[in-house]
Image: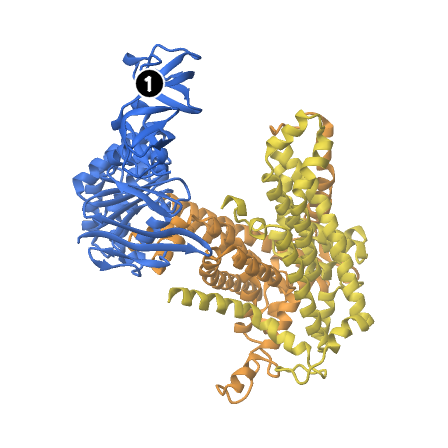
Chain colours: A blue, B yellow, C orange
Amino acid sequence: MSGLALQNITKQFGTFTAVKNVSLTVPHGTFVCLLGPSGCGKTTLMRMIAGLDLPTEGAIKLDDADITRVPTHKRDLGMVFQSLALFPHLTVGENIAYSLRIRGVGKEDQKKRVDELLSMIHLSGYADRPVAKLSGGQRQRVAIARALAISPKLFLLDEPLSALDAKLREAMQVELRQLQQRLGITTIVVTHDQREAMTMADTVVVMNSGEIRQAAAPVEIYRRPADTFVADFIGMTNLFDFTADSAGRTNALGSSIEGLQVPGGLSKGVLSVRPEDVHLTAPGHGAIAGRVTFVRDLGGTIETFVEAGGKQIVAVSMPHARPDVTVGQDVGIKLSPDACVVLKS
Amino acid sequence: MNVFLQRVYLGLVGLFLLLPLMVVAGVSVNEKQTLAFPPQGFSLSWYGEIFANPEWRNALLASITLAAVSAALALAIALPLAWFLWRRHAPWANVFQLLGIAPFTLPPVITALGLLTFWATTGFYGQPWTAAISHAIFFVTLPLVTLSLGFSSIDRSLVEAAATMGADDRTIFRTVVLPLILPYLVSGYAFAFVLSLNEYIVAYMTVGFTMETLPIKIFNALRYGYTPTMASVTILFVAIAALIFSLVARFGDLPKLLGAMSNNDK
Amino acid sequence: MRREAPQKLSDYGPLLFPAGMLIVFFVIPFATMIAVSFFKRDPAGFYSTAFVFDNYARFLSLFFGKVLGFSLFLAIAVAICCVLLAVPFTYLLSRSSRRTQVVWLVGLLSVLSLSEVIIGFAWSTLFSRTAGITNLLVAIGLMSQPVALNPSFGAVLTAMVYQALPYTVLVLYPALVRLDPTLTEAARTLGASPITSFFTVVVPALRNTIMATLIMVFIFALGSYLLPQILGRPQHWTLSVLITDQAIYQSNMPFAAAMAVFLVLVTLGLVGLTLLAGRKGEAA
């Protein structure tokens, strides 16, 4: 199979296990985001793919060749570091040409490739500038161009956009995704920013405590989270316990949920409902009873906090569908069965 | 493979640094008064000699007294200066920082000769206390550098916080600044003490004919006749230095003192 | 806390003692030395007041030129050897664990604090016929009989490198330990082997530090006064040795002072030149 394959990778630092038995395949040309809270092992996993750390157990294969023990400099990859790690003693052009120079590429060819890459990142004519004179976004692009100079088989980015301000970061996410699609290069990005992952990735890999919790397309991760951690980590959600009788009828937040059937044999669990799927109505008529505790009007969206069955439930609505409620008012909550994700507790 | 080569390189440098000391340690346990290596016989009597022989004992006492007094004096000069430079905005006062660093940076013979001409001109040449002042000036650089580093690592808002709680400048210094600066104070003293203990040329030029510190005594012995006591004293001094620096490392952050970022920043 | 300019006279209080001490016992002695360099030698005492250039005129001799030339040559040789040894060493040190670093630093500081007398004694023992390193070579059969390796130029150079190496490492240490480790990692992901990345990233990125270290070690080595005496022949004596010799044994303080002033000027001049060259190189 062409692409990257991680097989049962474990990494221990002393007694601490940073990555636990992780397996993952990344088909050629896909864009994968490793997403998780800090300390979840995503950076360690990437460093092992790059060869900067060696796995304690397991194998890494690239296009079916075992590269587990191949030293970093022989892996022909491109990597963008969180610190960017641009060489301060070299100019923009020299930074980009570094991997070509190391490989003994001729001066003329180096220059041609640098010009090509500079025009790709919209920095034509910057070759002779010192890197210290660039803005944050420009440095970012130079680091990307440098990593792509040899047209690597694998493009790795470790929190590449974390140093940029919010606006620039969003723009760069789009740019990076478009670039990757144009080049068709297998790309792995480490990030803790779920918006970033949702924007760019073909596959989002959610990690926690050194393990992969779910690896799937962004919409799938959002709509069908595999467990409570993923549901809670990706976007806003309402998590609450439910019980079910032998016929599969469910009861949660002190009322039964009409139309929701859970798989047979499951007597209790957790439901995840996205705030945009929570609909507020008048009390009664079979709706779950609740009382409004707070209204946050953000202009673009309105969040209504409702206390129901001892839990706090959040409903998000658009301005045109603004619910006509005030704090202290009794309301009803309608949950469509399609919107409820049933999870094990 | 590469790790192996790195270890070999570090090991060779370590060997280079240790080799002379190992030979001297070997020589120091010779049984007879001969300069021989590998040692012939084994005896610790040359270590006893340092304390038994009044000449060596006096030299040792003179060195330790000189080091203790001059390091204290160096600290007394460096502390108010470093504090002033940290507390006040007075660019011209940096000239004193420069003056404090110059004696240690210039070739030592120049500082030594300057002090020699000075003591000779003022008529105090040969007085033991002149050596203490000379060493204090020569080594003031060390506490000055550690204290400047220490002050720069104090969060200035701590001083403001103390002031909002009613502390005046003097109280702030005593209750906030001094406790925070203490590790740097101690290590500055330790550095000056150890280097003063080992210093030869300044001591020699200022009081060389009236007082024998241990380095002067060793040099004279080297010139006028060998004795294994030189070797045992050498080892004793290395051990003292290693002990003091280990204590500094034990109770302070040695890499940070020498310019690395603090452990917590990593 | 805002750093305020001193408001009242009493704000200057803390400066009083340090400034006084440094002026009285460093600035004035330095000035005295400059003044004495123009005085005349008095065979009966130290010197007599005068204003003559005789002491400086004595430099213009072949002998003095040779000594100066040798001093500079020796200091440069020591500086180059130390930097060549210390840059890779300090780099490896700065990449090792904090605990390992502490052990090495304690050792380096201990060696650094060793008196020149002790270093001289240790190396003269190591180079001696009866207790020296050649005994080891005889023992393993590489030599037929032990020989004395000093006095010689090699002995002086070795001992001076020994003396200056810990200093060199400690001067390089802050810059190397603060060097962003991802720079070399980046070089490795771009295809550079560890050795290539050391020479194409670490060394060039620290060019200015290495230049400054060369100068500092050069000045440090210029100050060596005992090792050339203990381990060398008279032709290996440096300016520092001559200054001590004139001041103490020949009781010619004016001439010693003139040489010292000259040494300061040469030192500062060379440092200035190097800095200037460095700045030009950077601008280019």
Front residue (pair B230, B188): B188
Location of the N terminus of chain A by quadrant is: bottom left
Q: Is residue B231 left or right of residue C281?
A: right
**Residue bearing mark 1:** A287
- Residue type, mark 1 in image: Ala
The reply to whether residue A92 is visible in this rendering is no
Residue at 55 percent of width and 73 percent of height: C155
Q: Quadrant of residue C159?
A: bottom right
Q: Quadrant of residue A57?
A: bottom left
Q: Is residue B136 left or right of residue A243?
A: right
**Location of residue C203 in the rendering, given as x and y in whole percent from the top left corner:** 40, 54
**Residue C155 vertical position relative to residue A195 in the rendered view, above or below:** below
Residue at 40 percent of width and 19 percent of height: A306
Which residue is at the far bottom? Answer: C144
**Location of residue B238 in the rendering, given as x and y in whole percent from the top left corner:** 65, 65
Front residue (pair B95, C273): B95
Residue at 74 percent of width and 49 percent of height: B72
What secondary structure is marked by label 1?
loop
Q: How many marks?
A: 1
**Location of residue A76 in the rendering, given as x and y in whole percent from the top left corner:** 25, 54
Location of the C terminus of chain A by quadrant is: top left
**Location of residue B130 in the rendering, given as x and y in whole percent from the top left corner:** 78, 54
Q: Residues within 10 Å of mark 1 (few under 14, many from 20)?
A: many
Which residue is at the far front? Answer: A246
